[in-house]
Amino acid sequence: MEKRALGRSGLTLSALSFGAMTFNRDPDGLFAATGTTSGSEAQRIIDICLDRGITTFDTADVYAGGQSEEILGEVLGKNRKRAVVATKAFGDMGRGDHDVGLSRRHLIDACDASLRRLGTDWIDLYQVHNVDGIVPVEETLRALDDLVRAGKVRYIGCSNHGGWQLMKALGTSDRLGLERYIGQQIQYSLLVRDAEWELLPCGLDQGVGALIWSPLAQGFLSGKFRQQSADGTRLGARGGLKAWDTPRGNAILDEVLAIAQECGASASQVALAWVMRRPGVTSVIVGARNEEQLQDNLGALDVALSDEQMVRLDTVSQPPIQYPNSHQRFFGRARNPQAFERYKS
């Protein structure tokens, strides 16, 4: 398994990470459509990940009301030191005024609670799960800095930020001498390439690596929903099929399936291989309800897309160019090279 440094830091992640959102003991809860993996099945999945070289495991306190963290901690067990454990805070974890958001009060309490659920003394990568427009960013960053200085957290990152919000946080950390975000966890796939306009270029410029969530667009890019219903799945529960089952979405899937046939691979493996080769991407998070799904996703490591195949996928999935990128390309292309215009080795 290839290992990559996360941004400009000493933290190394595996090129594929495992997302533990499917870990859940409650078959009737809010996260049931995502997965209900626990016990021996969860243990088997983690063992396979470690055997194949996956060292990075991502979760969040809000996943299944904390059960995802609990199960992940249990099944990692004695292998904790082999793993890079990443978790997140922001989501609503109770009924109190300070049970949600990025205030100092909530972040310190949330970190302590995550440590207890994970059964560990430290979190390798602690990420803010969203933007809190009510709390000053200085307060959030000082709290995170304190958690690092206390030894509870090793590195910090953000998730689901806008480009200007990421840059504001980085500038604040630099101005105040606080710990800096070294990673951003963002949505990115052949279907959702918005991150190419601001987030990924910002990360490349500022030394912030990217962990990718939903690289298969909630399973749409696997192609399985052409043969089966999305009922009972995360895609179906959130109405995603309507968003992706469009002329553009199906054209992308057709190309993915064609290249999969050429490579002797699955559609999922091709879609994951494309993301792993994109500029600025450190690690791609894959989830799995069961061993079969995990083994298929891990097969992406064996798929070597040619430059010609990368260009075909880039072309069919290229979204409309947004302003000011469109203006910069048209009037100043020679002085504004675009990292995401076309794949370049």
Image (cartoon, helix red, strand yellow):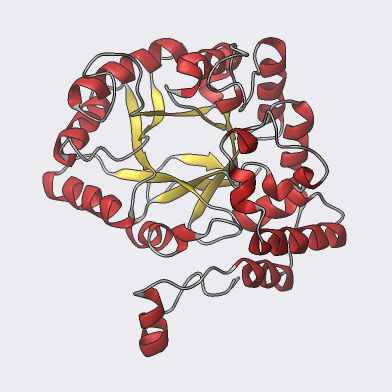
Q: Give the image location of residue 245, x and y in percent.
A: 67, 53
Q: Residue at x 54, y 56 (%)?
A: 192
Q: Quadrant of residue 258?
A: bottom right
Q: Which corner quadrant of the image does residue 328 belong to?
A: bottom left
Q: Residue furthest left?
A: 176
Q: Nearer the viewer, residue 310 or 65?
A: 65
Horizontal side of 8 relative to 21 (left or right) equals left
Count of all numbered marks drawn on residues in the image: 0
Q: Residue at x 75, y 33 (%)?
A: 293
Left or right of 58, for residue 179: left
Quadrant into which the C terminus falls: bottom right
Q: Nearer the viewer, residue 139 or 124?
A: 139
The residue sitting at 81% across, 57% down in the picture is 260
Q: Quadrant of the N terminus?
A: top right
Whether residue 117 appears in this view of the structure is yes
Instruction: Measuring from the top left, give residue 92's x and y in whole percent.
Output: 34, 22
**Res 237 quadrant in image:** top right
Q: Is residue 84 left or right of residue 296?
A: left
Q: Residue 14, how many percent across, how many down?
A: 58, 41
**Residue visible at 76% across and 54% down in the picture:** 303
Q: Residue 278: where, in percent of width, then height?
A: 56, 60
Look at the picture and state if 189 lies above or below 138: below
Tell me, yes or no, if residue 336 can be seen here.
no
Position of residue 82 relative to residue 329, above or below, is: above
In the figure, 186 relative to 156: above or below? below
